[in-house]
Image (cartoon, rainbow, N blue to C red):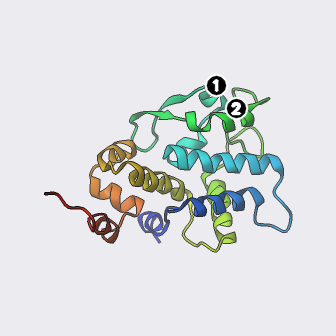
Amino acid sequence: MNKKQHIEKVNPLRTEREIQEMLFAIERGNGAYPKRPELAERDTLLFLFGINTGLRINDILKLKVSDVSDRDSFTIYEGKTHKKRTVNISMLKFEIKNYVAGKSKHEYLFKSQRGDRNISTVQAYRILQQAGESIHRDDIGTHTMRKTFGYHHYKQFRDVAMLQEIFNHSAPSITMRYIGITEDEINKTLDNFRLG
């Protein structure tokens, strides 16, 4: 399976219930023993960060404590597109404040258990995939977070142009396909739409 096929196989979480199930599964872990509290907190914040910012996993994992501590937003140059983006994190201010308390401002926000480095994209994928398996989903991966953000942003604001800009996509059709908005869903919005 190539990278494009893999991304298309991954789906957004379309309901608040699915999001809550995923959060619970991430916090609990998928083993015989409960996940250690510090890992549960890290992994939960990683997921919340992804679904609330729409950032790619590589950009999330590069963040340091100083990038987000005591801030409502931060600016990055996205790794894939090299475009400048200001990212609003005010909705996560409480969770971030609790999570970074006592941490060095120079350490990675999502630090590995092995030394002074960040967790890898492979480890982030494993965290999400294992949680997905425990809720009987085989369509969960790191792109699930970004797609979930996009899906819910579109459902709330119905502004594909804004979402296309956030995602740095070249066309609205790419954005709609990426977030899993199907033609049936679009047609359903027109059932009760009438002018004049």
Q: Is residue 93 above or below residue 190?
A: above
Element at label 1: loop
Viewer-proximal residue, 70 or 129?
70
Type of amino acid at the residue the image marks with label 1: Asp
- Is the C-beta separation of discs 1 and 2 under 8 Å? yes
Q: Earlier in the sequence, mark 1 or mark 2?
A: 1
Mark carried by residue 70? 1
* Relative to 172, residue 106 above or below: above
Residue lying furthest left in this view? 196
Residue nearest the viewer, comparing 107 with 26: 26
Measure how far apart labels 1 and 2 are at the Cα level: 7 Å
In screen coordinates, is 186 left or right of 31?
A: left
Q: Quadrant of the C terminus?
A: bottom left
The residue under the point 70% across, 26% down is 105
**What residue did someone put label 2 on?**
97
Residue 136 got which mark?
Answer: none
Q: Amino acid at mark 2?
A: Lys
Question: Is 52 rendered above or below residue 180?
Answer: above
Residue 152 % position (x, y): 46, 54
Q: Residue at x 34, y 58 (%)?
A: 176
**SS for dot 2:** helix
Left or right: 58, with 86 as reference point: right
Tell me where residue 23 appears, x and y as whole percent: 67, 57
Say left or right for 94 vs 7.
right
Furthest residue in direction right, as rendered: 33
Q: Measured from the top left, where is residue 20 in percent x and y?
A: 64, 59
